[in-house]
Amino acid sequence: GVDVVFHNVAQVPLAKDKNLFNSVNINGTENILNSCLKNNVNKIIYTSSSAVYGIPETNPVNEKMIPKPLEAYGSAKYIAESSCKEYIKKGLNVIIIRPRTILGHGRLGIFQILFEWIRSGQNIPVLGNGNNVYQFIHANDLANAIILSSDKNIKSGTYNCGTNRYGTMRQTLEKLCEHANTGSEVK
């Protein structure tokens, strides 16, 4: 009696445990796909990761780019995507969402330290000139994209999900410093 399964579970990169990545991200996804097929679920939305791209050759990344994961987490997510594609061939409608770096209320990840430094008025270092382009997605926007992808008229496919408004890391951090108005500067 289930129409749509939202598969958002993953062992995250901070674990740095290849066995957990395989157990949760690969085998867990295979179990979900198999169960959905056996139980005639109409659609599954699988939240993957842009980590499947490794270090992208250009930004923003697009769906035509060939994934080249560099570490165990990205590799596990890419293998799970391959399982999704096998189940598409078996007749399951699977949407693969590849979010860019997710930020939002209570979810800042590695950027938490930068927010704390800016809050306390400290200067923010950037590597080189800071002109590297970085694309994010707000957690609310990602949730909306995932929900919208459950529409029965959207067929199987892989979709990158990130903001269309982005600049260099320097520009992003300068705007954040300006907004906070604590005296922090990008150096």
Image: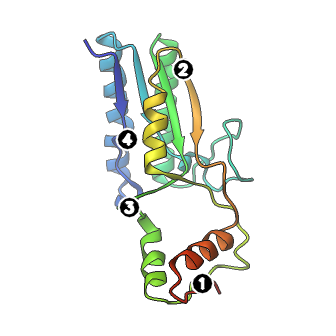
Badge 2 crowding class, 10 Å Cα cut-off, few under 14, some 14 to 19, many 20 or more, is: some
Which amino acid, mark 3? Leu
Image quadrant containing the C terminus: bottom right
Residue under numbered circle 1: 125
Residue mark closest to the camera, 1 vs 4: 1
Q: Could you tell me how far apart the alpha carbons at marks 3 and 1 are, in whole angstroms?
A: 23 Å
Please name the residue shown 50% across and 20% down the image.
86
Dot 1: what SS? loop
Instruction: Label 2, secondary structure: give it.
Output: loop
Q: Which residue bears the numbered disc 2?
A: 156
* Label drawn at residue 86: none
Report the disc number at residue 25. Answer: 4
Left or right: 107 in relation to 157: left
Q: Inspect the image, locate mark 1, and give the three-letter code of the amino acid beneath it.
A: Pro
Residue 103 to residue 157: above or below: below
Q: Residue at x 50, y 49 (%)?
A: 74
From the top left corner, tell me how far across and down residue 18 is, in percent.
Answer: 38, 52
First reached walking from the N terminus: tag 2 or tag 3: 3
Q: Which residue is the site of mark 3? A: 14
What sort of colour scheme is used for the picture?
A: rainbow
Where does residue 44 sit, x and y in percent of width and height? Answer: 40, 24
Tell me: residue 184, above or below residue 63: below
Q: In the rendered structure, which disc, 4 or 3, sits on the residue that comes first in sequence? A: 3
What is the CA distance from the residue labelled 1 to the residue labelled 4?
Answer: 34 Å
**How far from the left and from the top, in percent, is residue 14?**
38, 61
Q: What residue type is labelled 4?
A: Asn
Q: Which amino acid does label 2 sit on?
A: Ser
